[in-house]
Amino acid sequence: MRYTSLLQTCYSYAMKVRSVLFALLFAAFLIFTPPMLLADGVDTYCYDCLTSFEQLAYDAIKDCLTHLIPSWNCGSIPQETIQKAYDCFLMDHPEVFWTDGYTYVTSYVNNSISGRRVEFTYNMDKTAIAEANNDIYQSLLAIVLETGSISASYETVKAIYDYMVRNCTYDELNLDQSMYSVMVDKSGVCASFAKAFEFIMQCLEIPCTVVYGRLTQSSGMLSTTIGHEWNIVQLDGKWYHVDITSGLAISADQGYPDYRFLCTTTEEICRTHIIENPVPVPDCSSNDLEFFRLHGMTVDTYSRQNVAQAMLNGIENGTGPICRFSSYRAFTEAIDDLFTHSGIFQAIKDYTDFTVSTIDYSIDEQMLTIRLDV
């Protein structure tokens, strides 16, 4: 265990108390109290990836931001190092939501550099921070009471994923990219969702951080990318990608929860995402918690029976008739048999005893999924 230095003078933090009787988490945001105790590695992923020189900048920025210090004489530390350390600190610490950035200032005397400093911009004072933390506390308590799960487990990660998808909305007009907008207002953009999810995970002592990158979007023959943020989370020593925003958007569109972005691998996430992180992303190669495989909804070898069973499992698990293919070959074989040659009608009759003459369906070639729209 280690002590995480937070605001000594104005910062409110979450103290976790586990009730044996109710098995619930009670978080208290306290003013003017000692630092919060967190397990090693829960909120230091990016910090641990930095060089010792970069860590010096990170520590200085941390001290400034958590004490609302307006400026820091950074000596000879270059702006590139400052930017990386600043990004990494905010990636590790979503609970610091009152900064709007900084300005790197170089001073000259007689045409010679006399000094360099970093001037920080804040959007809240001590009173506003305390009020915002109280709002966050109330929201965090409500989330934990509703989900009823506090263990460092897949079930907890899924419960929080479900809660955010079910109760929050994506709002591209919301300019607040901090966790506050999602935690309290229940709306925001990808950065807000990623930081809110990270904050909840860290309060539950589940290692988690934010990933920077881009999201690919296709429309006809055109393909574009937009800036995006999501998460990686560690369970039982293995890292997994989690993207609340992508799951939220697709779930709202199709009317079923979408779990393709819950505890998935780097190989899978990179079908639709491009990683552009300031520090390396850990190996995320385990698919043992991938939702489709975990619940028997993945088809490795194509047959009508395998597809039917996978879709029936999907219905049983609340996602509707959907299946995912582990290879492009199995995916194209299914498309050819079921839709090009209309085998879907006989398959439905054989495995459900229903007779239909028309069927709507959707195909995702990037994610290798087929869904029947019924």
Image (cartoon, rainbow, N blue to C red):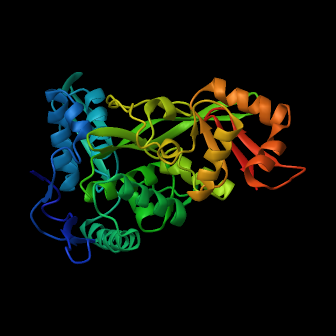
Q: Position of residue 13 (x, y in %)?
A: 21, 64
Query: In this rendering, would 63 be left or right of 363?
Result: left
* Total count of labels: 0
Query: In this rendering, would 214 be left or right of 101?
Result: right
Determine whether 361 is above or below 221 in the image. Answer: below
Q: In which quadrant of the rendered view does residue 302 lie?
A: top right
Q: Nearer the viewer, residue 179 or 269?
A: 269
Q: Position of residue 282 (x, y in %)?
A: 32, 31
Q: Say whether residue 197 is visible.
A: yes
Q: Position of residue 96 (x, y in %)?
A: 29, 55
Q: In which quadrant of the rendered view does residue 352 lie?
A: bottom right
Q: Nearer the viewer, residue 140 or 112?
A: 140
Query: In this rendering, would 92 be left or right of 306?
Result: left
Q: Nearer the viewer, residue 343 or 27?
A: 343
Where does the C terminus fall, quadrant-wise? bottom right
Q: Say whether residue 97 is visible.
A: no
Q: Position of residue 37 (x, y in %)?
A: 13, 57
Which residue is situated farthest in the right direction here?
357
Determine whether 106 is above or below 68 in the image. Answer: above
Determine whether 69 is above or below 118 in the image. Answer: below
Q: Residue at x 59, y 27 (%)?
A: 327
Q: Residue at x 55, y 57 (%)?
A: 317
Query: In this rendering, would 28 be left or right of 158?
Result: left
Which residue is situated farthest in the bottom direction here?
21
Q: Residue at x 80, y 41 (%)?
A: 344
Q: Residue at x 59, y 58 (%)?
A: 316
